[in-house]
Image (cartoon, helix red, strand yellow):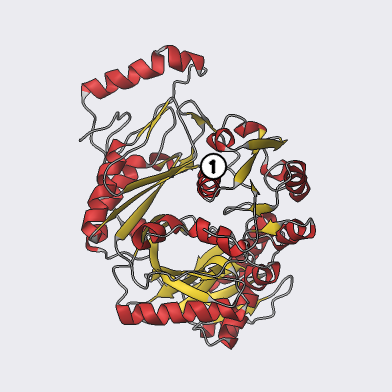
Amino acid sequence: MTYARRLSRVLVANRGEIAVRVLRACRTAGLECVAVYSDADREARHVALADAAVRLGPAPAQESYLSIPLLISAAQKTRCDAVHPGYGFLSENADFARAVTDAGMVWIGPPAEAMEAMGSKISARERMKAAGVPVVPGALIGAPAASGTFEEILALGLPVVVKASAGGGGKGMRVVREVSSLSEAIASCRREALAAFGDSTVYVEKYFDSPRHIEVQILGDMHGNVVAIGERECSLQRRHQKVVEECPSPAVTPELRSRLCRAAVEAARAVGYVSAGTVEFLLEPSGAFWFLEMNTRLQVEHPVTEEAFSLDLVALQLSIAAGGRLPELPAAPSFHAIEARVYAEDPDAGFLPQAGRLLLWVEPSGPGVRVDSGVITGQAVDVHYDPMLAKIVAKGRTREEARRRLVAALRETVALGVTTNLSWLGRLLESDPVIRGETHTSLIETLALPAPLAPPDEVFAAAASVLSGPAAAAMGGTKSSSPGPFDAPFRMGGGA
């Protein structure tokens, strides 16, 4: 791409698979890239891929990846002229964006003012109402004293959901189905919101039991152009955390897509949005949809849009940040793409996050398969950070072709040494409602998945040789194991 303003070196202020993703995009664009790392990530994949790497500090994120002074210092010491925040950590922190620009560098993301406008869900709701975007009926509850009354809340009709205004990722959120639970839910959400985000402000919305979660990818440049690039279906969630996403949604018609995209563009224009962002909606079976929130950053699930539309959203972010105009973009997807998030977690123990060392990590390949990962064989999986290891994406000419390719890719993935959700993901994608595309945000809570099959004896033998061999001894003699896709506790690949 041709840049209107010359960028030469980018600091990637993140870790894991998103750091790897951004580093590769920078390389493709001909830019040098600098990684940052904590003591826990000294041997991580993103560190090895960068042109240079700077140690931030100890493993805790507050002393490393969440320290604005340390990140600015790292960028200055390595003479970076731009910073890409990835997602998570400080990616939606307006103070960080301002610190970058105040230091004379380019922030590869939206203006700090747009981040602030959408960072408070209460403020965002009011802006969206003013812009004519449909908003979920709700009642505001301030902090520390309630500014809404129980009468206002009950007028919405139970159930309702209490949400942290500054929240995300399911934190500071409670569904209330009985009047007697309302006061405690509000108090509990305030405590959790204060601990997680430093802000105890909460509000209450009407709760829809089985809506679809639909989000629209938007892009804006510095010349006033804003476009929407289709929608993603993100209804397969566990405790408000997305686990499988796809593009396009099997529930969205061309007419509904047009209305969703129009609303998303209006939402972005209302805050002067620049760069990549996502506008999230709840979709009812009737076709009515409601604004949920806006994520002022690149989304975890951006690869499904990239694969469906044959785009590189990070490359477009780089071009926009350098002053470039948005190019002509496809109006409709050419493929169907589905993504599964692979986590170091134990589905049989309530999805408890897992730690350890990956004795063997083998990624799948094949037609239409893409893997965005941040790990390699021998790497430690640390308890200090998000337990996501990789995102496995498959695309096809039809939804069913994409789904089958993803199921096959999960079967081929090998993860030994750390327990993962690979088997659970495969069984989820093989369930009847998912096959039919009949998904909603409560589906996983009610779905009874079959138990994993026992692997053949040769799989146990192969896994045992890895776990007891010289490589394992060199890695500290880890004895933990990982259930592979669809079988447990070991799988080296292949069919069931």
Question: Where residue 56 sits: x, y (%)?
Answer: 71, 38
Image point (36%, 57%), residue name: 307
The reply to whether residue 449 is visible in this rendering is no
Q: Against 410, is 170 above or below?
A: below
Question: Where residue 493 sits: x, y (%)?
Answer: 27, 32
Image point (21%, 57%), residue name: 400
- Label 1: how many residues lie within 10 Å, few (<14), some (14-19) or many (20+)? many
Q: Residue 399 lies in what quarter of the image?
A: bottom left
Of 166 and 305, which appears nearest the observer? Answer: 305
Of 301 and 424, which appears nearest the observer? Answer: 301
The answer to whether residue 167 is left or right of residue 337 is right
Q: Residue 99 lies in what quarter of the image?
A: bottom right
Q: Against 243, is 265 above or below?
A: below
Identify the image quadrant of the C terminus.
top left
Image point (51%, 45%), residue name: 24
The kind of residue tagged 1 is Gly
* SS type, badge 1: helix
Q: Against 79, is 306 above or below?
A: below
Residue receiving disc 1: 16
The reply to whether residue 261 is visible in this rendering is yes
